[in-house]
Amino acid sequence: MHLETYRTLWGDARPWADSIAEARAEGFDGIEGRIPGPDSLAACRDALASTGVPYIAIALTGGGVTPRQDASLQDHLADLEAALIRATTLAPRFVNVLGGNDRWSAAKQVDFISHALTLGQKHGVTLSFETHRARICATPWITLDVVAQLPDALFTADISHWVVGCERLLDDPCDDFSAFIARVHHIQARIGYDQGPQVSHPGAPEHAAALRFHQDFWCAIWQDQARRGYARTTLTPECGPDGYTQSLPFTNLPIADRHEMNRWLLDAQRRSFAGCFPASFPTRSF
C-alpha cells in the first residue's frame, strides 16, 4: 500500500498555483483544501490541470467550521450539493465532509449522512465524513453509534478532536474503536492532547505519549486498510492557525512554525508508515 501525502491549504489564501508549487517543493504529493467559490473555481481548476497534482476537496455545510446553530438538516444538505457541483469540476480524489452539527442526535446524524451519500452517488464523488468538534461525529461514542447504522459510509479520522473533547488519550482497555477504524478512508494528522487539539510541537519530548497514541491509532488504520485491499492511503498533516498553533501571551506570537510542524509530521509519518507492515509487527486493537 502506498502512502500519499497532502499539504493542507488551511490558512493559505494564495493562488493555488503558488500553493501547489510549494507543496511539491516540500515533498507532498497533493493538496487538501476547501472547495473554492464560483469566482476562483476556474483558476483553481487550471492550476490542478496544469500540474497534475491530486486534490482532496473539503466541503463545509451550514456555515463556517462552526455551523450556524439554526441551520436545518435540509440547509446542510443544500450546501453540500452546491459544494459537490463545484467540486466535480476539480476531479478530486474524494470530498471530505465537515458537516452537520454536534447538537444533533445520533439518529439525525445518520439521516444526514444517508442523504449525503445519495448526493455523492448523484454527482459521482466519494464522500468521507470527518470527526470534528462542533460537527457530526464530534465524540467517539456517538460516532460508534452512527457507524453501526451506516455500513456504506466512510470517515476521515481527525482524532485530535476526540482527545481534547474527552480530555484524555483514548488508550484505556475499555476503548475499542475497531468498528470505526474499519471504516476510515482518510487521516488528518495532528497531535491533540487532553487540554487542546494541537500540542506545542509534535516532536517535543513532553508530548511523546500523545504522539505515540496517535501514531499507533493511524498504524491500526493503515493495517486495516491494507486488509481491505487499499492500494493507496491518504494523509494530510494538519497543524493549523486559528488558535491551534499555541502563542505567547500579550504578543500572540506563535511558539512554533505550523508549516515546519507539518513538514515534521510528513517525515515522521512516512517513517511510521514504513514500520507498520513488517511480518512481525503486532496488530493493535483500539
Image: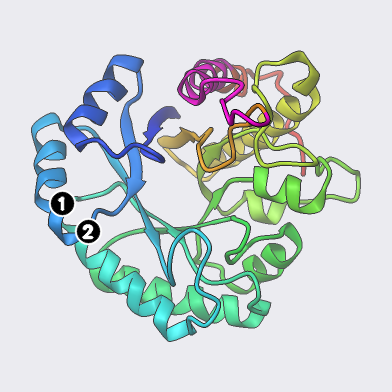
- Tell me, for residue 40, which label it has, or none: 1
In front here: 61 or 215? 61
- Residue at 56% x, 15% y is 271
Residue 8 quadrant: top left
In front here: 45 or 125? 45
Q: How is the image coloured?
A: rainbow
* Cβ atoms at labels 2 and 1 below 8 Å apart: yes
In front here: 81 or 171? 81
- Residue at 73% x, 32% y is 283
Residue 243 quadrant: top right
Q: CA distance from mark 2 to mark 1?
A: 6 Å
Quadrant of the image containing the C terminus? top right
- Tell me, for residue 37, which label it has, or none: 2
- Residue at 22% x, 23% y is 21
Secondary element at image label 1: helix
Mark 1 crowdedness (10 Å alpha carbons): few <14, some 14-19, many ≥20: few
Name of the residue lying farthest toward the front:
250
Q: Amino acid at mark 1?
A: Ser
Quadrant of the image containing the N terminus? top left
Q: Start and end of the magenta stretch?
A: 249-271
Assess whether residue 268 is covered by the magenta stretch.
yes
Taking the image as shown, residue 9 lies to the left or right of residue 239, namely left
Q: Position of residue 168 (x, y in %)?
A: 84, 43
Looking at the image, is 170 positioned above or below residue 259? Answer: below
